Amino acid sequence: AEYIFTGLFTVEMVVKIVARGLILHKHAYLRDGWNWIDFLVVVASLISPFTSGSSIQVLRTVRVLRPLRTMTRIKGMRPLINTILRSFKALGSIVSLLSFFFIVYGILGIDLLSQGLRGKCYVDPREGVNSFSDA
């Protein structure tokens, strides 16, 4: 099934490149950002049978974009996907803010609680070192 989809996507890409041109004029194939995704998916699918080792894992990861490529064909999905992709910028700042708070409270917790926990988190295998009677 993988080879069938790769063949269909390759034929579609080639037809679009022949009809529109590759990159030289205004309406060329690679002037559209969505076609870049299509191009990368098809090229990764064509290269993956000839590679081995760790590089094939990267190419398989690129093939995960195939459902996104198919969803862009539906007219109503393209604005939705554009909105989701634009929202990632705002999510980046939220993740940064949360990371800052986690780090600050983590350092504060370690500083405040480290004195009471010193020597309590492990058992020293040496004879007579551990004293559990004062706990």
Image (spheres, rainbow, N blue to C red):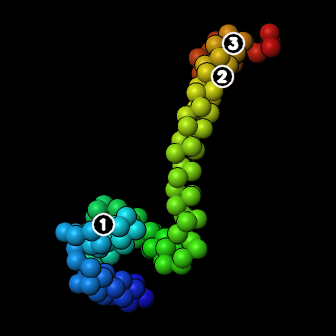
Q: Which residue is mark 1?
A: 31
Kindly tell me whether residue 67 is visible in this rendering: no
Tell me the kind of residue under disc 1: Arg
Disc 2: CA contacts within 10 A as few (<14), some (14-19) or many (>=20): few
Q: Which residue is mark 2?
A: 105
Residue 92 picture location, percent across and down: 53, 41
State how far apart marks 1 and 3 are (Cα).
57 Å
Going from the N terminus, do you reach mark 2 or mark 3 first?
Answer: 2
Q: Residue furthest front?
A: 26
Q: Secondary structure at mark 2?
A: helix
Residue 84 picture location, percent across and down: 57, 57
Number of marks in picture: 3
Q: Secondary structure at mark 1?
A: helix
Which of pointers 1 and 2 indicates the residue nearer the eye? 1
Which of pointers 1 and 3 indicates the residue nearer the eye? 1
Kindly tell me whether residue 87 is visible in this rendering: yes
25 and 38: which one is in front? 25
State how far apart marks 2 and 3 are (Cα).
10 Å
State how far apart marks 1 and 2 are (Cα).
47 Å
Q: Which residue is mark 3?
A: 112
- Screen quadrant of the C terminus: top right
